[in-house]
Every structure is written in structure tokens, then in C-alpha cells.
Amino acid sequence: MTFRPLLLPALGALGLSLAALHPALAQDAAAAAPTVNKGDTAWMLVSTILVILMTIPGLALFYGGLVRTKNMLSVLMQVFAVFSLVAILWVTYGYSVAFTSGGEGTLGAIVGGFSKAFLAGVTTDSTADTFTKGVAIPEFTFIAFQLTFAAITPALIVGAFAERIKFSAVMLFTGLWVTFVYLPIAHMVWFSEGYLFGLGALDFAGGTVVHINSGVAGLIGALLVGKRIGYGRDLMAPHSLTLTFVGACMLWVGWFGFNAGSNLEATGGAALALLNTIVAPAAAGLAWMTVEALAKGKASLLGIASGAVAGLVAITPAAGLAGPMGSIVLGLVAGAVCYYAVTGVKNALGYDDALDVFGIHGVGGILGAIGTGIVAAPSLGGYGVGEYSIGGQVVTQIIAVVVTLVWTGIGSVVLYKITDAIVGLRVTHDQEREGLDLADHGERAYNY
């Protein structure tokens, strides 16, 4: 009988015991090997898949049902292609620019560097700090989760100029916009060295980064591309509210990954965000429906679905910070205000935001971002930390909103102009009348 099989485990156990007896050694070991929680990792993988679901097919179907039959495939194609393009840009340089240090000084507070370009140094053993007291998730998981946020944001924009923009313009603008607008905003808001992060701005899951960002870019695009032929004169009703309803439901389901996943671990904080992602859009949908019924005499399916999306937008920055009662109030306000933004303000100003990207995502995002400073207050049932001052936090939130508006506004104008100079923004009148399905893609959504 040999004692060698017993000797190695015994020596290993002795080594672990000695390390445990020496605090410094134990601390060094813990620092060298962060604990990867399998439950948190599993939740983040599921959340990533949910956000993909809310983009393709959720957002694609929601938008597709809202356009005319002759443009259905063009919207599906744009959302799908934008998602695919951003996925590649994200892993080549986007993740690095958004979530690594950009060095000391002002530039480093605005944009990151290229130390992890092409995912250099990322392995199956590397971890991402989840800001959860040392618990870590695999870095690949964090990269994939954040990729979905970067992809859905420009996909939201395409609804503003639907039915009249060139496909080549969508692709070129998306590449430029993600690089020069989205990545700096994400860095400023979510990276620990970012300017707005340092100010203490609260954005749990993307009120500024995703919704205000896309809403403003969409509005500028609608203005620069111009109105659709016959806008305000011809009937431009949605061709399939059934598909829009299916897409809206997928958006809502996928949004649980968007909001609850942003907690980055499977704890009570994720459960709070999930519950808020139920009650806020429910309240907003009911508010929109009620206001619409009072104004027009009837409540519409499109109205309650749009209201629910407005509520999802508004609760996004506050999902893990507001109490459920505060989320309901935020949803009610968002549903009513976004209704008037879509039906009143747009009609009064006469711009053609085809699928109401600014009225829902822009206005809802601004309401949510500023409202987060209120509903996150512990005195109002929220979960803001530290010596919380509602007035001070609201001022910080307003600063974050203004910075996002200015950066996105100026950047988007410049990038639309560049795109127009290179490939042109708009299809010809004949192509627009024919429909972008045939003009751009040579296909029909429906062959009778």
C-alpha cells in the first residue's frame, strides 16, 4: 500500500490551513482569485438573452407593425442589421472605449482607452467588477450584457426616420454615432472614472445612456431627413397593430433583463427592479389609456401599448432605486406626459417623428432621469444611499440630462451631415412611393 495518494491532499489541506491562520495570506489569496458566483453569472446570462429578445424580434416587430405594408421589411432589416453591426464594433473597440480608463484629466472623464481593444487580455478566467462588494462575474458575461445595451440604442433611433431613409445611411450613421456619441455617454455615466459618475448622477439601467440619447438623435434625424411624402395629408396608419402588440409584449418581457439585469447580481435589488418593471409600465399604460379616452372618447390598443413603453422608459434609470409606490407615480406621470408629447407637441410643431421615438424615449427618458432624483429618496420609500438630499440629487440629475442633450444633439447633427455628404440620407421620391422593401431590399413583406 502506498501513502502517496493521501499525502498530496494532506499537504494541500495543511497549506490552506496555514494560509487561513495568516490573515495577510488569506487576503492576498482572495484578492488574487475573486469569487465567481454561479447564480449571479446565470442570472446575467439570462438577462443578456432577454435584452436580445427585446431588440430582435421585439423592437423590430413593434416598429414593423407601425409602418405601412410597403416598408415593413425595411424596418425589420434596419433593426437586425444595426444590432449585428454594433455587436462587432463593441467587441473590437466599443467595450474598451466605454469601460476602461482613458487616463488622467478631462479626456479620461469623457472617454476610455484602447487597452482592451479586440478584447485583449480578456479570458474565461477574467472577471468584471460588479460593484457588489467583491462578488464578480466573468468578464465575457459583462461584455455581452453591455453589448446588448449598445446595440438596442441605435436600433431605437431608426423609428424616427422610418419609411424614407437610405439603408446605407442607416448603417454608416450607426457606426459613426455609436463611436462618437454612445460610447462617450456610456463612459461618462457608468464607468467609475466617468464625469457624470463622479458627480453622483443616478442611472440604474440607461435613462440617459439609452433613452435620452436615442430620443434626441431620433428627433434630429427626423428633422434633417425631412417629412415623409404626403405627411399630414395621406393616411399613414399602422399596417398591423397585431404585430405591434406582439412586439410591445416582447419588449416588456425583455425589459426585465434590461432593468433587473442591471443590478448585476441575483439579489433583492434585482427583485426590486423586476417588480418596478411590472408596476411602472402598468401604471403608464393605464394613464395613457385614460387620458386618451377622455380626449378622444375611446381608448386604443396602440395607446395602452405606447403608454406601457413610456413607463418602461421612465422607470429604467430608477428601476433599482425607487420603491414600488414611487415607481407607480413615475409611471402615471410618464404615461400622461408622453401622450401629450406625442399627440400635442408633435402636431403643434409639425415634425415627422414617424414612430414617436422622441415623444416616448426622449421625453420619457428626461422625466425618468430627473424623477429618479425624487423617487430614489429614502424618505419617499426609495433606496438612495448616503446623506440623501432630494434637491441636490435632482440638480445632479438635471446636469446629467443637459450634458446628454448637448453631447448627443451636437454630435448627431455633425454625424448626420457627414453621412449625408458621403452616401446621402434620403431615398428618391420614386423609391419612397414604391416602398423601401422593394427599393432597398428587393423583397415584399407579404406576397398575396
Image (spheres, helix red, strand yellow):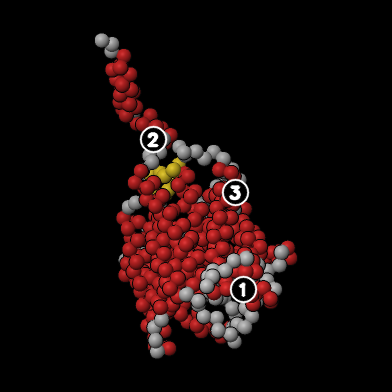
Is residue 320 shown to the viewer in this render? no
Q: In terms of secondary structure, where does tag 3 sit?
A: helix
Q: Percent position (x, y) of residue 311?
A: 41, 71
**Residue of label 2:** 30
**Residue of label 3:** 93
| Residue for point 64% across, 75% down | 434
Q: CA distance from mark 2 to mark 3?
A: 30 Å
Asked whether disc 1 touches disc 2, contact meaning CB atoms under 8 Å apart, the reply is no
Q: CA distance from mark 1 to mark 2?
A: 61 Å
| Residue for point 40% across, 89% down | 297
**Residue of label 1:** 435
Q: Is residue 406 left or right of residue 320?
A: right
> What amino acid is found at the position of numbered circle 3 in the picture?
Tyr
Residue 172 versus residue 146: which sits nearer the camera?
172
Q: Percent position (x, y) of residue 208?
A: 51, 64
The mark closer to the camera, 2 or 3, is: 3
